[in-house]
Amino acid sequence: QVQLVESGGGLVQPGGSLRLSCAASGSIFSTQPMGWYRQAPGKRREWVAFITTGGSATYADSVKGRFTSSRDNAPNTLYLQMNNLKPEDTAVYYCNKVPATLADYWGQGTQVTVSS
């Protein structure tokens, strides 16, 4: 049974940092690349970063140089370190396998709000 539980979001000022965590069930985490996605109000869900089972990460241009993703295989946890946050980073952040569609199971996400 797939379980994805995101945490770590909050309200932060521009230029601040947050670290998101995602606890994932073993069946999805250990065998597939995992990624972070986000959805801002009125916008489509977009991919932010993905990380292979070996730990190699790739980032969307909008977050490159500011966000860093990592994974800990014991326990099955995915992380997203977000630095130099901007108002346009405001969104609900989700983790999931890569690729994932809206028809797949999704967790509840964690809200990130960047505002002064």
Image: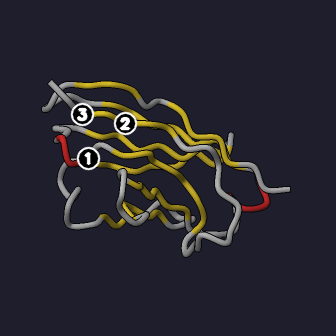
Amino acid identity at mark 3: Val
Q: Kindly indicate whether the residue at mark 3 contacts the one at mark 2 (C-beta within 8 angstroms).
A: yes
Q: CA distance from mark 2 to mark 3?
A: 7 Å
Q: Kindly indicate whether the residue at mark 3 contacts the one at mark 1 (C-beta within 8 angstroms).
A: yes
Looking at the rendered structure, the secondary structure element under dot 3 is strand
Q: Residues within 10 Å of mark 1 (few under 14, many from 20)?
A: many
Count all numbered tags in the image, as a single digit: 3
Choose between 67 and 100: the one closer to the eye. 100
Display colour scheme: secondary structure
- Which residue position is annotated with label 3? 114
Q: CA distance from mark 2 to mark 1?
A: 7 Å
Looking at the rendered structure, the secondary structure element under dot 2 is strand
Q: CA distance from mark 1 to mark 3?
A: 7 Å
- Which residue position is annotated with label 2? 112
Residue 78 spot, x, y in % from top left: 54, 47
Q: Residues within 10 Å of mark 3 (few under 14, many from 20)?
A: many
Q: Which numbered dot is residue 77?
A: none
Residue 86 placement: quadrant: top left
**In the displayed structure, does residue 80 sit left or right of residue 35?**
left
Residue 56 spot, x, y in % from top left: 42, 64
**In the displayed structure, does residue 21 sit left or right of residue 28?**
left
Amino acid identity at mark 2: Val
Q: Which one is earlier in the sequence, the residue at label 1 or at label 3?
A: 1
Q: Which numbered dot is residue 89?
A: 1
Looking at the rendered structure, the secondary structure element under dot 1 is helix
